[in-house]
Amino acid sequence: MSAQLPLIDSFGRLHNNLRISVTDRCNIRCFYCMPAEDVQFMDKSELLTFEEIERFVRVAVPMGIDKLRLTGGEPLVRRELNTLVAKLASIPGVKDIGLTTNGIMLAQQAQGLYDAGLRRINVSLDALTPEKFKKFTRRDGFEQVIEGIRAAQRAGFDPVKINAVSVRGMTEDEIVPFGHFARETGVEVRFIEYMPLDADNAWERGKVLFAHEIIETLSSSIMPLRPIEEESASGHGGPATEFEFDDGVGRIGFIASVSQPFCMSCNRIRITADGKLRNCLFSMEETDVRSLLRGQAPDDQIANAIRSSVAAKKEGHEINTARFIQPERPMYSIGG
Ligand code: SAM
Ligand code: SF4
């Protein structure tokens, strides 16, 4: 099989987007992702080295992968992440590198990451008070995250986006403050419906606060939201649907994975920190790429592994059916 053919699956979806998890470790313990205590982290020897990640990306790019996002665990706890960014930014054909971070260590690293070639940052922040922040994350750190967001803006990242997981019984009081925050700071706030990927297996559909409910609250409490047309949207929304307030000030996005699954437009593959290729967040199978990378496999063999994984991609997740089975790996171990 040619390594140059685009990555199209059996449902006609073209894949150009690779999410790379660089660690499963994290400095906080969000309840929707990690267990509270006794987390079993991967051994350091299991993690792909920066050189292994770079080689994998060099094989994937001629197959049409041109958008990368670094994630984890918390990617900023991996030492010298800026050197990985620089390696990836130097690969011809890579058009876009993003990072998703909890922001705790961002103030110290924002400028170095920008200088290395990173251009887009999503900071995860579920609440706008320290007390509520702690309820989500089981740790302190709210002020550090706010400082991280400011540092990212100062370093030149544009746009900076916030990811807020929307959880019934917790997020309701945050909606209007986030609406004002988006209007005052220019940061786009994106609400992500809580998905069944928590280590505690406590997810229930009834615990998801749906996108349409948030739209109603913002529209009645601040002012109506209007959808941003594709041409004027950033083009980087991915699965997010983007809105702005009627006066054009303040952007709000929604990733409605539960209430409005977007599987039919999914263009993503993922590699875990221990080198397992996954064609879906919810997939039950993965392909061991690390053993190929460490076993001197030629590029063709790695390319074939990527192609086979994409070919085997299922039509979509089945969260809304009785058939749904939660994957064994929670979010922090897959790489969100
Ligand atoms: N530690 C980084 C962070 O939190 O931004 C990167 C990894 S985290 C797994 C990536 C994203 O997944 C975050 O925005 C987080 O809020 C989101 N996430 C984690 N668990 C989730 C869940 N069960 N449902 C929806 N989003 C989730
Ligand atoms: Fe850590 Fe991110 Fe998971 Fe929160 S969502 S526990 S910050 S990996």
Image (spheres, grey):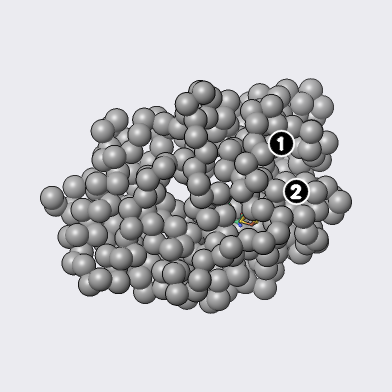
Query: Where 208 falls versus 135 (above or below)?
Result: above
Q: Amino acid at mark 1?
A: Val
Q: Closer to the camera, 70 or 152?
A: 70
Secondary structure beneath disc 1?
loop
- Residue that appears at 70% across and 48% down: 31
- Residue that appears at 24% across and 59% down: 302
Q: Which residue is mark 1?
A: 167
Residue 27 visible here: yes
Residue 90 visible here: no
Task: Give the image location of residue 264, x and y in percent.
Answer: 39, 30
Task: Give the image location of residue 331, x and y in percent.
Answer: 56, 49
Q: Which residue is mark 2?
A: 136
Q: Which badge, 1 or 2, is on the more N-terminal residue?
A: 2
In the displayed structure image, the side of residue 36 where residue 293 appears, left or right: left
Query: Where 260 falls versus 55 (above or below)?
Result: above
* C-beta proximity under 8 Å, tags 1 and 2: yes
Task: Decide: few, some or many residues near mark 2? Use Cα within 10 Å; few <14, some 14-19, many ≥20.
Answer: many
- Residue that appears at 55% across and 62% down: 24
Q: Closer to the camera, 152 or 315?
A: 315
Query: Where 160 falls versus 7 (above or below)?
Result: below
The Cα–Cα distance between marks 1 and 2, rounded to whole angstroms, is 10 Å
Secondary structure beneath disc 2?
helix
